[in-house]
Image (tube, rainbow, N blue to C red):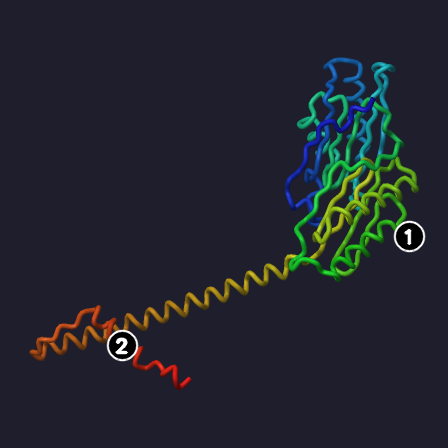
Amino acid sequence: MSTFMLLLLLASSIASLTTSASDDYTDFVYAGCSQPKYTMGSPYQLNVDSVLTSLANAAAFSSYANFTSSAAGGSFPAYGLFQCRGDLPFSDCDSCVRSGLSRLSAFCPSAAGAAVQLRGCFLRYGNDSFLGKPDTSVLYKKCGPAAAGGYNSDQLGMRDAALADLTSGAAGGSYRVGAAGYVQAMAQCVGDQSAKECDDCVAAAVAHLRAVCGFAVAGDAYLGKCYAKYWSNGVYTTSKTDHGDEAGKTLAIIIGLMAGVALIIVFLSFLRRAGHDVLSNGESKCIHESDVIQKIDNGSNSSRPDPAHL
């Protein structure tokens, strides 16, 4: 019986919904661990160690590899594979796989079966022969925020066109990309899938994205043997500009208010001086600040137009 994915750990960062050349391919997406544990020093543990070592060594010169080990005990074979993103050079693939192996050790210590998905690679091992078998079960999905202003037919059309590129007959291969307008899409199948199995898996992932992500500006869908995702370039540019405009307007208002206060202070100082001059001339009139404010108010009221004449 398969021991895979009985426990799932998920990444929570919305940043995982965007992909670009500047992305860190070692960013964590999800990990799954079996509940059963192997016994340290057992034949199965030795076979797992052999498989994981082989994966680490192969990543330096291949974007996909799978291994089976039963050397320590034929009754307890271990199976494993890794798949790097198709656009990564071998050096980055090697770094990603080694990072994934360290995550497996941290998240799933002594687990009989486990998997980890990073931004740039996928690793899995277990005691069941999952190699070469299709798997379209949804392991992880995430949708980004809705498009600004809600429904946007242009953006929705671009998203659907970009996703359609992933499932078209011209797509081919295990690594696929699509684009329409400012929306981009990408899909990757695990290398143990046939062309038809890859087509079916990507189609299932795309259908899931369309069904669950609605008007979201980005979405990820990770299935057992493939994933598909889309994202919108520049979707936040407008909102950032708007925030900048609002900040500029607010600053202008504050400056205007400060200038008004400064004028009032100057006017009050002038009136104080005038009062001082009156007192110095022997007149007994005392001017208080409250009187000045009242006079300003009265003066303002006297200058207001009669509503009847508006």
Amino acid under disc 2: Asn
Q: Quadrant of the N terminus?
A: top right
Residue 62 seen in the current view: no
Badge number at residue 298: 2
Residue occupying the far front of the picture = 308
Amino acid under disc 1: Ala
SS label for mark 1: loop
- Residue 173: quadrant of the picture: top right
- Residue 268: quadrant of the picture: bottom left
Q: Name the residue at 77% across, 47% down.
A: 211
Q: Nearer the viewer, mark 2 or mark 1?
A: 2
Badge number at residue 170: 1
Q: Position of residue 192 (x, y in %)?
A: 88, 35
Vertical placement of residue 89 versus 255, above or below: above
Q: Name the residue at 76% across, 43% down.
A: 221
Q: Name the residue at 38% across, 81% down.
A: 307
- Distance of label 2 from label 1 (alpha carbons): 81 Å
Q: Position of residue 153 (x, y in %)?
A: 75, 61
- Residue 44: quadrant of the picture: top right
Density class for disc 2 (Cα within 10 Å; few <14, some 14-19, many ≥20) is few
Task: Judge from the rendering whether residue 134 lies leftward or rightward of residue 45; answer left or right.
Answer: right
SS label for mark 2: helix
Q: Name the residue at 13% across, 78% down.
A: 278
Q: Quadrant of the C terminus?
A: bottom left
Badge number at residue 79: none
Residue occupying the far bottom of the picture = 309
Sequence-wise first label, 2 or 1 = 1
Vertical placement of residue 79 versus 118, above or below: above
The foreground one among 296 and 95 is: 296
